[in-house]
Image (cartoon, grey):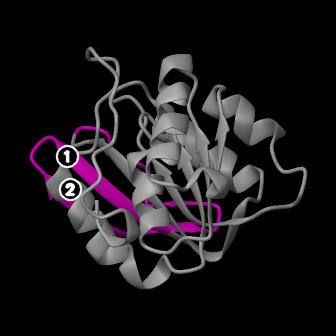
Amino acid sequence: MAGQARGMKLKTPKGLNTRPTVDSVKESIFNILNPYIPGSKVLDLFAGTGALAIEALSRGAELAYFVEENRNCCNIIRENLAHTKFLDKGVVYCRKVSNFLREFNPENIKFDIIFMDPPYSRNFIQETLQLLMENDIINDKGIVVCEHHRNEMPSDSIGNLRKIRVKNYRDTRVSFFVNG
């Protein structure tokens, strides 16, 4: 963890139901995103422990929404927000990502940075990117960071989303998309 919550360890669930982002991958992602984080609104889809959006809050993001369907993980996200003293900047939705994206946006909130780290090899990437575009929740020039298995390759473009960069880390790939 860097920034305001530097050195704090986040709680993780027991077992193999989540696949936390490896520290070296997370560091690389944030080296790329750092200029865009201060004051941003962040959405963390398939949030797991919430580590990506909590890192963004620690580096100056204004607000983070977390979407995770596993109730145990939702409780862990809340605990991690409390531990890092970001409880007032985080909103946790314990529900399926697809349902959230179809039903969300009572306040017309649009996000500057969206993290998505779906379970590998389950074909969630394309569907989720499509739902992001259909429901118009990404700001113009907003960034989507998609972590996926190296054998899964999202399209180069979906609507106004354009893939601008791909980073490879062993079995993991991170694709960066920009809206507009």
Q: Secondary structure at mark 1?
A: loop
Instruction: Kindly indicate whether the residue at mark 1 contacts the one at mark 2 (C-beta within 8 angstroms).
Output: yes
Q: Main secondary structure of the magenta part?
A: strand
Can you tell which quarter of the image residue 150 is in?
top left
Q: Position of residue 164 (x, y in %)?
A: 39, 73
Q: Neighbour class for label 1 at 10 Å: few (<14), some, many (≥20)?
A: few
Q: Is residue 136 magenta?
A: no
Q: Where, quadrant-wise, is the N terminus in this rendering?
A: bottom left
Q: Is residue 98 above or below residue 13?
A: below
Q: Find out whether residue 155 is within the magenta segment.
A: yes
Taking the view exactly as shown, the residue that stands out farthest to the right is 106
Quadrant in which residue 64 is drawn: bottom right
Say the numbered circle drawn on residue 25.
2
Mark 1 sits on what residue?
22
Q: Which residues are magenta?
A: 151-177
Quarter residue 2 falls in:
bottom left
Q: Nearer the viewer, residue 42 or 103?
A: 42
Asked whether, in this view, residue 180 is left or right of residue 125, the answer is: right
Q: Secondary structure at mark 2?
A: helix
Residue 46 in view, yes or no? no
Q: Looking at numbered disc 2 in the image, what kind of residue is underneath it?
A: Val
Q: Is residue 25 left or right of residue 121?
A: left
Answer yes or no: is residue 177 visible.
Answer: yes
Percent across and percent down for residue 109 are 79, 62
Residue at far top of view: 15
Where is residue 6? Give x, y as percent: 29, 64
Q: Is residue 105 above or below residue 136?
A: above
